[in-house]
Amino acid sequence: MGTETLLDLHIDRNAQQVRRGNEVLPVNGLSWRLLECLLSHGTDVVSFDTLAQQVWAPAVVGEDAISQRVKLLRQALGDDSRRPRYVRSVRGRGYQLCAPPQPIVHDTVAMVIADSALVSPRHGRARWIWLAAGVTVAAVAAAVIVARPDPAPVLPADPVLQRAAYYAGIGQASNNERAIGLYRQALQVDPESLTARRGLARALAADACLFNGARERAEEALVLGGELVRKAPEDAAGWAARGYAYDCLGAMSQAMADYRQALQRDPGDERTRASLAYLQQEKGDLAQALQDNLSLRAPERVRFRDVQVARELELLGFTDAAARRHARNFQLYPDNVFANIAWPRSLLAMGEPGKAQAALDQALTRGTPHPQLLRLQGELRLLNGNRKEAADAFEQSRALRPQQSMGQTLAGLYGDPAPTPAWIAERLQRLKGQGDDGWSDTALERALLLQAQGDEAAALVALRHAVSAGFRDAAWLRATPLFAPLHGAAGWQGLLDTIETDVSAQRAQVLAATWRPTDLDGLSAARAAGTR
């Protein structure tokens, strides 16, 4: 694999990147795989069956799904189906490129593949390859290319590791499982391979984080990460892999510490910088998280960065700018689970439950289900007065990740039969001592249980603990039916005011900053403050 051109497009297959001039186009996930398939066939017509087999397998898709993905690819490339420049449809047969791709040949290429344990950022242009869903390809390429001083990274030399990285980078549950199998295979051949250990650790953690896998997989990833850090303490990718395992296990403090260790060793590791920014967002440091995400030099390589930026703008009160980004992400990245969650959740927070339900119905047809989608379904059913369907949605959410405490609590609170006082007390007892690692979810769960006990004052205290831990979503608190019984309680408005006071100060920082998003130009602080 190498680089080639398609008319005015520059396509780097190693980096999975498409550029027009200096602009990086949003071609990733299934859209990238579709383009790569078309490129491999030159200007031949690629049938629907071939596309389904080479791009979607083992999933079974029809012509409508393929046509929709071609439409998304055209949008990303700036193509017009009526006057196509890059991809044309051939009625009843499939699709083909409008022009033959042309390889780019460099006069001199000297390439050295080295184990990452022997390379540090101090030794020149060592680069880490980060792929979708946070999975890292752990071999490092140091390349010197005449007439191209900043070369793209390359995949590992081992074909098994190449294929594992390819599958891990797709961002789908079945392909992530293939990657896990290939990484294990590579470790059977070479048990000391740091590359295989890193890749396996990332893929196992991703299975638990993104694809409803068992907690034991994240725990195995943590063990592998610990081995990486001990064997190669100067290896940034090893620290990042362990940080991701901690992240997926809910250990925020340890995850942030490891991410910072990784960035000390490789300040150019943008995937880890974005992961750290997400945890800063969860701790309530919204302006800092937004600044860090907007400062990424190659944001197109960070799968969830656009979703994070939209969420940070939303929490900061820039509702219009956030809505534009959420809607765009929802349209362009149908295979991105967090984009699918963010848009309907944002619509609910904006007081648009009908639109939220329509977006959620669409999101539930896309790829791997997620507990948060089903929890949102439960909230919308409650708003419609349908407690039975809400209970069903909460139970489905619990069943997807039975180890998650919040899912257990929601399913119990709204299930049939109704929870007993003894059950609520037992749940509260289990939560004692939990939530001390920086996450606000445990405090929110405790508030729900105390509310169910009828203790409004204690429930509000728990919500204040959530705010202290970083919770900043006042709009959701207003909109969700989960806390509707507290709306008239003494202290409810004061709780919302506490959140808004902090958010207003951070919003002012963003409005005064030189790094603020371009789509905030023209917004005054007064207008931004009035969007909540």
Image (cartoon, rainbow, N blue to C red):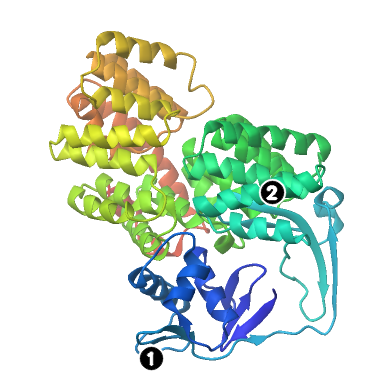
In the image shown, does 58 or 8 lie closer to the viewer?
A: 58
Between 510 and 228, which is closer to the camera in this rendering? 228
Q: Which amino acid does label 2 sit on?
A: Tyr
Indicate which label's residue lies in the foreground, 1 or 2: 2
Whole-Å distance between the Cαs marked 1 and 2?
44 Å
Q: Is 218 placed above or below 339 here? A: above
**Residue 168, quarter of picture:** bottom right
User: In terms of depth relative to the viewer, which is nearer, 393 or 357?
Assistant: 393
Secondary structure at badge 2 equals: helix
**Residue 183 badge:** 2
Who's the residue at 24% across and 25% down the image? 415
Against 246, is 510 above or below? Answer: below
Is 381 left, or right, of 305 in this rendering? left
Mark 1 burial class by Cα count in 10 Å: few <14, some 14-19, many 20+: few
Give the answer, above or below, for where 494 lies relative to 334. Answer: above
Q: Dot 1 corresponds to which residue? A: 83
Left or right: residue 191 versus residue 385 is right
Q: Where is residue 483 in the image (x, y as percent from the top left)?
A: 24, 29
Q: What element carries label 1?
A: loop
| Quarter placement of the N terminus | bottom right
| Amino acid carrying mark 1 in the image | Arg
Residue 390: tell me if it is visible. Answer: yes
Disc number at residue 320? none
Spot occupied by residue 514 in the image (x, y as percentages of width and height): 52, 59
Q: Residue at 63% of width from left, 60% of height from top?
A: 166
Q: From the viewer's perspective, tell me whether residue 396 is left or right of residue 357.
A: right
**Residue lying at 41% horizontally and 33% vertically, measured from the top left:** 471
Q: At x 31% / y 57%, what residue is drawn?
A: 320
